[in-house]
Amino acid sequence: MSKLKFYIPVIAFMALAILMWRGLYLDPKELPSMLIDKPMPAFELTSVDGAQISNDELPDKIFLLNVWGSYCLPCLIEHPTLMRLSEEGEIPVVGVNYRDRQNLAQEWLLDNGNPFEFSILDENGRFGIDLGVYGAPETYLVDANGVIRFRHVSVLDENVWREEFEPAIAELRSEGAAQ
Amino acid sequence: MIPELGSFSLILALCLSLMLGTVSLAGASRNNVTWMNLARPLSAGIFVFLGFSIVILAAAFVGDDFSVKYVAEHSNTTLPTRYKITAVWGGHEGSFLLWTFMMAGWMTAVAACSKSMPLEFVARVLGVLGLLCTAYILFMLGSSNPFARIVPLPPADGVDLNSALQDIGFIVHPPTLYMGYVGLSVVFAFAIAALLSGRMDAAWARWCRPWANTAWAILTIGIALGSWWAYYELGWGGYWAWDPVENPPLITWLFATALVHSLAVTEKRGVFKSWTVLLAILAFSGSLLGTFITRSGLLTSVHAFAADPTRGIFILGILGLAVGGSLLLYAIRAPQLKTGFGFDLLSREMLLLANNVILVVASASVFLGTLFPMVYQAMTDDLISIGPPYFNAIFMPLMALLIVLLGIGPLTRWKKTSVSYLLAQLTKVAIASLVIGVVLPLIVIMEFSWVATAAVTLAAWISLSMAKDIQNKTANKPNLLAGLKSLSLSYYGMQAAHFGCVLMLIGVSLASAFSLEKSVLLDTGDSVDLGEYIFEFKGTESVSGPNYVAERAEIDVTRNGNAVETLHPERRIYLATGAPSTEMAIDAGFFRDLFVTLGEQRGESAWAMTIYVKPFIRWVWLGAIFMALGGCVAAGDKRYRKLRRKIEEPNQAKVEAQLQPGT
Amino acid sequence: MKTAFARQSIFLSIFFAVFAAILLVSYSPTTVYAQVDTFAFETDEQQRRFRRLSDELRCPMCQNTNLTGSSGGTAEDLRREIHRMIVGGMTDQEIEQFMFERYGDFIFYKPRLRAETVFLWFGPLLFLLIGAMVAFGIWRKARTVDTVEHELDEQQQERLKKLLEK
């Protein structure tokens, strides 16, 4: 009986090894947003074009909030997707120009095209902090009541749109219809 | 063509390792002397071929052979030659080759320095090491070959070595760390050999100790070098971040420290045998775990090599087989190990057992904290961070407890010590320590500080206890000098290592409690004072380097009107990228460090800068040096050499007798 | 034998001297990761609080660094916010709450105590108790061996006596 206690180390180790094996397959996770199911933070800022804007200017229907910057290469990569969404009128896209310069942002939009209804100018990153942003690009899905329902970090390409956003939007729409 | 020779050399080393692993172990269990005798030459052969591989890889770097993928990823034509050579261990593949080469080095050392051990035992030890070596080389050839080529078009120039690695810290830290880590495989092999043979006598412990002490000492230095490097690389005074890649060496070190103490008891008293074997397996597991965590991407860290789950699986497999297998062997064979004599609750054995418990608990706790974020994510699908506040809260109290026991332990006797004896020895020491602890800080800093008093009291407690022990041991000698001469190297090793703990204790506590820091905006001619020092900003001048332009500031430091040092921090712009970088200037001192990091220019001639005064910070690493010194000194004790002389002398006498006429 | 000792002493002295020298040599400028913000604080206490918070909060976009050691944009912004909040009179708890609302548990290097982290915080104590029990067990086992051997010794002593009497 007392000999069984010598087996404790090997059993404990095996459990640990299985744990670490499982751990290898855990997807590196993006930081979950703390604002899910919470309303959009309040703001009173200017847009990239110089207009005064606040929460009242946000769309009344489901929309995307995209955090971008002229310095951000992945933002350029996801740009065609955003352009398509905006041109096809599928869903409004509002931008947050994060930690950028107004003139550089304007130039970037002129050079590449502007998919945004408008872009909130957040030069010092203060609004980004309220959103819990930790690096561009990030895209939030906001419902018709101004409540944040979903966040995707990093490039929003066609795959991500199809696999993550479309189902989420469908769910929101059916919720809205049910109410 | 030549890099392929490197691969081929690896294959040859693999064959030899496989042979070593199988033939030696088989030879030992069948008592086949021919097979067992192959062990030593095979070890030497593996060492030669792995050495050859490393030389070829280094040559590929120095020769700018960018057709080799590894070279292209970590080097560049403009890289200084010394960094081209050290870039050999700049990434996963090359550093693993270095790891395996160190293994071969230790194997050869065992082969060379084992004349006093029975052949069967040596064959088993080398056989186990050979098996490990086989696994490592298989891993390299299978998934991480440093000699892989880029086909069809090699790049004209390489990516370059990460600029953080172009530094002396990178030259010394990885090789030393690996040497220490891998050295623990030797003790592991000794333990497995004992389990396989079913015998573990006092001789086993005596053979084991020098190897354990030396590997431990080298690991201590390896970790200390990493900490020292991080200190001046990070630039804000931190020297240990409890990062998931930093923690495994510490976990291994804690197990190894417990092992070193446990071996002492096993050698002298024949107890703790199965416990010592378990510790040897755990210490070695720690080193494999370190490799696993660094290379598999299991945990997020600034230090980790590029993550690759398939490599992770392979290493986990090696870990599972080696550690799982040895723990299974332990479960089956350990009960057979006969234990020696009993001992009282108050005895040196018991105090060393307490030492072991604390060290192992500390190690397990660090392991828990390191792995917990992963477990948490698996449980809750959420992310959590565990960092210095947690680790310090758990680790420091355990170490404090250990330090208190450290004052008592060396004074206790084996088997049985009476409470009255200890009280007689230590009451005065305790009172004196408390007095020094209160008075000394008061004198130096003119105010009471709990941290300073606690740290100085503990430091005095151990120092005075050590002095008392030396006094006891030299009491019956004609004079002090004769007394000191009579003490063994093993004893001096112990005292040196424990004194290292004292130094480290002072360094850690006083640096953290009394560090000063100030961020200021200074114009030319302005000065700021911090602590006892006055820093006067004399302005900047433009300088240029090989690949950068910079503004170099001049800061005069004075203390009580006397000039101390002039510091020259810089703000550089590297021409290639246009990115600015901050260069700090340090005045390193025995009792304190001063350093300045230069920030941005604000306005015509005003600059932002941060100034630091860090008292006693160097004592952290000085403590590590003393610990390592102690380990090496103890390993050199003459009782580990005696047996060799015993074998030599009779032969000499025999030869001389045979030369006498008439016999 | 004497030469072996001398060789070892020389090796050890060189070893010690080399490492001590590396340790104490002053350095010419070296690139660092540290940041220089020049936030002005009204009191030393505020500066200390700032440093503690900046040390204990994790940079959300870095691999594994605190706010003090990070050069990233988000880290810079967060340090600025902490300064603003300290100077604005918020307590440490309020500042931490602010950070939690935006970044969650991840941003704290000191994990909050809740049901899932109970094992994390009390695990070490548990280990200590288990360790003490194991130590006690080893002590007891060694003691019983002692008494058993003693008995054998008596048996052997009898045999010895018989042998001597022969």
Image (tube, coloured by chain):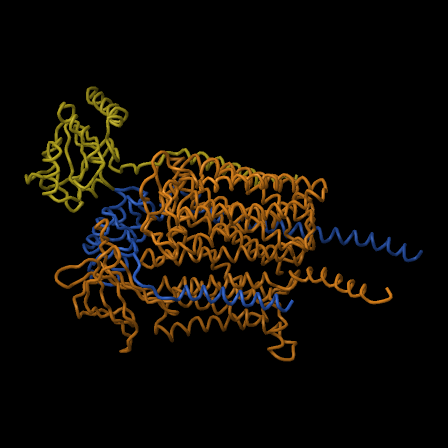
Q: In the picture, residue A144 is in which quadrant?
A: top left
Residue A97 shows up from this direction: yes
Report the residue at 46% width, 50% height from top: B249
The residue lying toward the viewer, choosing from B575 and B291, is B575
Q: Is residue B283 above or below residue B381?
A: below
Q: Is residue B219 above or below residue C25?
A: above
> Seen in the image, is B408 located left or right of residue B544?
right
Quarter of the figure with the C terminus of chain B: bottom right
> Seen in the image, is A78 located left or right of residue B197?
left
Quarter of the figure with the N terminus of chain B: top left
Residue at the outermost bottom position: B478
The residue lying toward the viewer, choosing from B545 and B454, is B545
Residue at the outermost front position: B1
Measured as percent of width and height from the top left, residue A11 is found at 56, 37
Letter of the chain shown yellow in the rendering: A
Report the residue at 44% width, 68% height from top: B456
Residue C127 shows up from this direction: no
What number of labels is visible? 0
Residue at the outermost right position: C166
> Seen in the image, is B494 located left or right of residue B391?
right
Measured as percent of width and height from the top left, residue C144 is found at 70, 51
Q: What colour denotes chain B?
A: orange
> Seen in the image, is A154 located left or right of residue B471?
left
Letter of the chain shown blue in the rendering: C
Measured as percent of width and height from the top left, residue A179 is found at 20, 21
